[in-house]
Amino acid sequence: MSHLLSERTPKCVYPYFDEIVSWMHHTNSFIKWDAIRILANLCAVDVDQKFMMIYDDYFSLLHDQKMITAATVIGNAWKIIEAWPALEREVTCKLLEVPNITYFDKGEPSPECNCIACGHLLDCFDRYFDQSKLQPQILSFATNQLTSSRKAVVKKAERFIKNHSAGV
């Protein structure tokens, strides 16, 4: 099942929610990543509040050793906040833990992977910053990214601060 189908017509995919949940810890990373995307897309039509039953498990994937798994959660977190605005503060707090998480590349801790995850985090925060209750904390995170070893992350942080610091 494609995450694109769940993006375009989530109501058609929603009946398969429980099956898709079982993919979250699949040994095939591509299936796992699709599950993460699909479940976030389904939040928009989750009339039975099924996502709340898997909320902790879903966000525990931020601590997966593979940065791409965490980045997939990060990149889709804004969809969950859009569907469930009351979760914004709690989700943002979980996301703000990312700079302190160790990701691995080829079995070794990778600060570079953490930098990449932080870049994805800036993109995510950009999607809902204006509605956030934690704007000062998000801006502090963005300011910390100005010293990232990745130039692309520094540029994202500069743009983020430029676009969002005026109102805070």
Image (cartoon, rainbow, N blue to C red):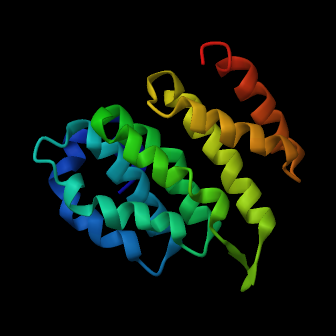
Seen from this angle, which residue lies furthest bottom? Answer: 107
* Residue 20: x %, y % from top left: 28, 63
Quadrant of res 44:
top left
Compared with 1, 8 (above or below) is above
- 151 horizontally vs 140: left or right: right
* Residue 43: x %, y % from top left: 27, 43
- 65 horizontally vs 3: left or right: right
- 23 horizontally vs 53: left or right: right
Which residue is depicted at the point 68% across and 50% down?
Answer: 118
Query: For the image shown, how many numbered marks are present on the structure?
Result: 0
Looking at the figure, which quarter contains the N terminus?
Answer: bottom left
Q: Is residue 106 visible?
A: no
Which residue is depicted at the point 54% across and 46% down?
Answer: 75
Looking at the figure, which quarter contains the C terminus?
Answer: top right
Q: Nearer the viewer, residue 4 or 158?
A: 158
* Residue 10: x %, y % from top left: 27, 40
Which residue is depicted at the point 69% across and 18% down?
Answer: 163
Q: Is residue 120 visible?
A: yes
* Residue 12: x %, y % from top left: 20, 43
- 150 horizontally vs 80: left or right: right
Quadrant of res 114:
bottom right
